[in-house]
Amino acid sequence: MAEKSKVLVIGVTGLIGKFVVEASAKSGHPTFAFVEPLSTPADAAKANFVQGFRRLGVYVVLRFLPSVFGSDVDRAHAVEPARTFYAAYYTDIHRLLEEEGIPYTYVCCNFLVGWHRSTLVQPRTRAASRERIVILGDGNAKVVFNREDDIGTYTIKAVDDPRTLNKILYIRPPGSTYSMNDLVSLWERKTGKTLERVYVPEEQVLKKIRDVKSPDDLVWAISHSVFVKGDQTNVEIEPSYGVEASELYPDVKYSSMDEYLNQFV
């Protein structure tokens, strides 16, 4: 068997990085992790992650570098301030890699299901409502909700795969892809209750973006891109620049939203 590639992971104490590190080490890749300096009491939890990495055989180096895990912002219909944010933190970095001829694989991981947990994407809530749900737009845009450990698994699968070289890896498993209308219907079937659906038209969403202060305007602008414009799924994946993870790796047993929501019923 060919020797497995060395893997460097940056931002390992964030929402995704720790899962990528674990998947890489468990797959037998020589794994290196960059970690920002840990010097305050609030860093205790991060220090525990680092110790866990060392037990897995991960080489840990204390240093901070930015992460560019995200969605396909080149093809998004984002309004300000999301457009400028995407350009500064994603698009400019992508162009630099391409111009310098550095081999790459962009990972479009879409939404992190753990970030939204059981809230059905309701802001400032801890649990999904059993009475009322707010939906941006008409609720028909398809959104992708991926578990963080599934993202880590797919990412490491792509490391040595020539099919992902200089390509975008879209993580869009069909069982994780729902419109908000379909997601609410799924929740209603699980709870046995019908929710009042409150729809926010696009013009009201755009007004909200203009009226609120930073950083809330960015949050609303990204939500407009995802839930109103459908930017996570409205792009057909062209073989010239992209591949879809669940099609490329059908052996991966990912967690569907149907399965994930069972724990909150």
Image (cartoon, rainbow, N blue to C red):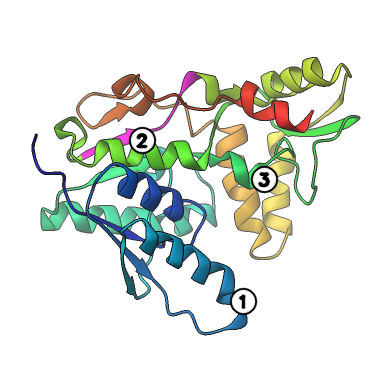
Please identify, in this view, whether the residue under mark 2 or under mark 3 is nearer the observer: 2
Please identify, in this view, whether the residue under mark 1 or under mark 3 is nearer the observer: 1
Position of residue 20 relative to residue 154, above or below, is: below
Q: CA distance from mark 1 to mark 3?
A: 37 Å
Q: CA distance from mark 1 to mark 2?
A: 31 Å
On the image, the x and y values in percent for residue 101 come to 10, 53
Which residue is labeled 2 in the image? 154
Position of residue 174 relative to residue 21, above or below, is: above
Q: Which mark is residue 42?
A: 1
Indicate which disc, 1 or 2, sits on the residue closer to the N terminus. 1
The amino acid type of the residue labelled 3 equals Leu
Say if the magenta span includes residue 171.
yes
| Label 2 crowd bin: few (<14), some (14–19), many (20+), radius 10 Å | many
Q: Which mark is residue 22?
A: none
Q: Quadrant of residue 169?
A: top left
Indicate which disc, 2 or 3, sits on the residue closer to the N terminus. 2
Q: Which mark is residue 206?
A: 3
Q: Residue at x 29, y 27 (%)?
A: 243
Q: Are marks 1 and 2 in contact (CB under 8 Å)?
A: no
Q: Which residues are magenta?
A: 167-174
Q: CA distance from mark 2 to mark 3?
A: 35 Å
Residue 125 visible in the picture: yes
Residue 77 visible in the picture: no
Tag 1's secondary structure?
helix
On the image, the x and y values in percent for residue 86 come to 43, 54
